[in-house]
Image (cartoon, rainbow, N blue to C red):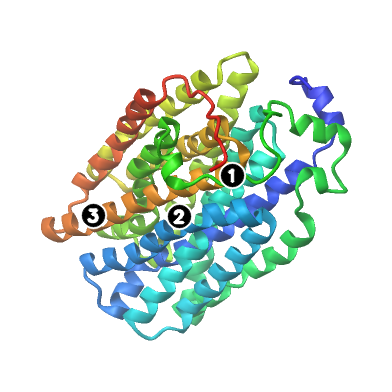
Amino acid sequence: MSMTDTKTVAKIGGYRWTICALLFFATTINYIDRQVTGILAPTLQAEFGWSEVQYAEITSYWTAAYAIGFLLVGRFIDKVGVRIGFAVAVIIWSIAAAAHGMVHSVFGFALARFILGLGESANFPSSIKATAEWFPRHERAFATGIFNAGSNVGVMITAIIVPWITLTWGWRWAFLVTGLFGILWVLCWLPLYRRPQDHPKVSARELDYIRDGIDHTEPVTPLHVGWLHLLRYRQTWTFVVGKFLTDGVWWFYLFWLPKFLDARYGIKLGKLALPIVVIYLVADVGSVGGGWLSGALIKRGWEVHRARKTTLLIAALLIVPTALAPLASSLWVAVAIVSVAAAAHQWWSANLFTLTSDMFPRQAIGSVVGLGGFAGAAGGVLFQRLTGTILESTGSNYLPVFIICGSAYVTALLIIHLLAPRMEPVTLAQQ
C-alpha cells in the first residue's frame, strides 16, 4: 500500500493510536516517578544535609542504573517482546518509586534511586519498538513525538501534585502516592496490547497501512545480533553519539532546574509549579511539532535522511541561546529561554529516536536503542558529576553549565552527519 491521503487514512481505522496513548501514559508515569526527586531537591537536601557534590552523586546513582539497564533491557525486550517485557519493567520501577518514601538513610535513598533507574530504562526501548511494530515509517516520528510528550506532561503533573502532597502530608507521601500510578497502567496495558498481526481489533486495511514502508524482506524469526556486531556500523554510532552528548542536558533540566530557579530567583517549593508547568507545556509543543514536521516533509517527497536532519538542525539551533539563561534579568526571561530549549530538545529527541527505525530492522531496534540509551546515561553521569563540581567550586555559578547545554546539540548533529550522510538502512545477518 502506498501512502494515502487523509480521507483514505480516516477510513482505515486507528487502533494504533490507542497503542500510542498507552505509550504516552507510560512515559508520563515514568517521568513523574523520576522527577519527584528533582522537585523535592531543596527539601531533600535539607533533610539529608547533602552538598552540591553529594546531590550530584545521588542523582548519578539513578543515571548509572539507567545506563546499565539500557544495556540489558534492549535485548530483553527484543527477546521476550514488548507486551511482557514492558509490564515487568513498569512493575519494578513503580515499586522502587514508592520505596523512596520508606527509606531513612542516604544509602536507602540511593538504593531506591538505583532500582528505579534500572526499571525506568525500559520505557524508551519498549516504546520505540512498539512504535516500529504499530506505525508505518512516515508516521513513526509523529507517534514518537506524541508519546515522548508524556515526559513533559509527567514533569508538569509532578510540579503540581508533589508540592501539594508534600506540604499537606510530607515528602514521603509524595513518593508513595506517585509510585501507585504504574501499577494501574499495567492493568490496562496487558489486556490491550498485542502485535498488530495478532490483535483482534486491527482490521486488514489498518494492518496493510501499518506495513506501508516496511521492508518485507526482513526475517520473521527473531534476529539475535551482538552488541559488538552492531557497533561495527556507523549507523549505530549516530544514535550512540547523539544520545551521549545530549541526554545529560535533559536530565540537567529535570534534576537541577528547580535548584537553579531557587538559587538564582529564590523560587521555593510552594511557588515552583507555575514556571515548571510553563517550561514543560512549551516542551510538549516541541515534542509533537518536531515529530510531525519530519513526517510532513517525508510526505511531501523529501528523502528520509534530509527530512530528519533538517528537523534536527532546527532543534539544535533553537537550543544554542540556552547558554544565556543564567544571565537573564528576570525569572520569566529565564523561563522563556529554557522553555524554548526544552521544546527543542523534545523536538530533537523525537527525531533522534526515529533514526533507529529508519536504519535498522525491527528485530534489532531494542538493542540499538539500548546501546544509545546506555551512552546517553553514561554521558548523563559524567555531566551530573561535572555540574556538581562546577557549582561547588564556583559558588553555584550556573553559566558554565548552561554554555555546555547550548553547544551540545550542534556538536552532536555535526558528528551524526559525518558518520551517516545519507542514513542508509542496515542489513544485519544472523549471528
| Residue situated furthest top in the rendering | 301
- Report how far apart the C-alphas of labels 1 and 2 lie in the structure: 15 Å
Secondary structure found at label 1 = helix
Q: Is residue 387 above or below residue 322?
A: below
Number of labelled discs? 3
Please state the horizontal and vertical placement of residue 34, each as a whole percent of the image. Answer: 47, 63
Please state the horizontal and vertical placement of residue 391, each as a whole percent of the image. Answer: 18, 57
Question: Which mark lies nearer to you, 2 or 3?
Answer: 2
Residue 224 left/right relative to 218 = left
Quickly name the residue at label 3: 387
Badge 2 or badge 3: first in the primary sequence: 2
Residue 151 left/right relative to 238 = right
Residue occupying image coordinates x 65% and y 42%: 131
Give the class, few, some or many, for how many residues have Cα within 10 Å of label 1's Cα (few <14, many ≥20): many
User: Which residue is more in the foreground, 194 or 288?
Assistant: 194
Which amino acid, by three-letter code, is at mark 2? Leu
Please state the horizontal and vertical placement of residue 12, each as a whole percent of the image. Answer: 85, 31
Give the class, few, some or many, for how many residues have Cα within 10 Å of label 2's Cα (few <14, many ≥20): many
Please state the horizontal and vertical placement of residue 382, each as a whole percent of the image. Answer: 27, 53
Q: Quadrant of residue 132?
A: top right
Which amino acid, by three-letter code, is at mark 3? Thr
Quickly name the residue at label 1: 128
Badge 1 or badge 2: first in the primary sequence: 2
Quickly name the residue at label 2: 71
Question: Which mark lies nearer to you, 1 or 3?
Answer: 1
Whether residue 124 is visible, yes or no, is yes
Secondary structure found at label 2 = helix
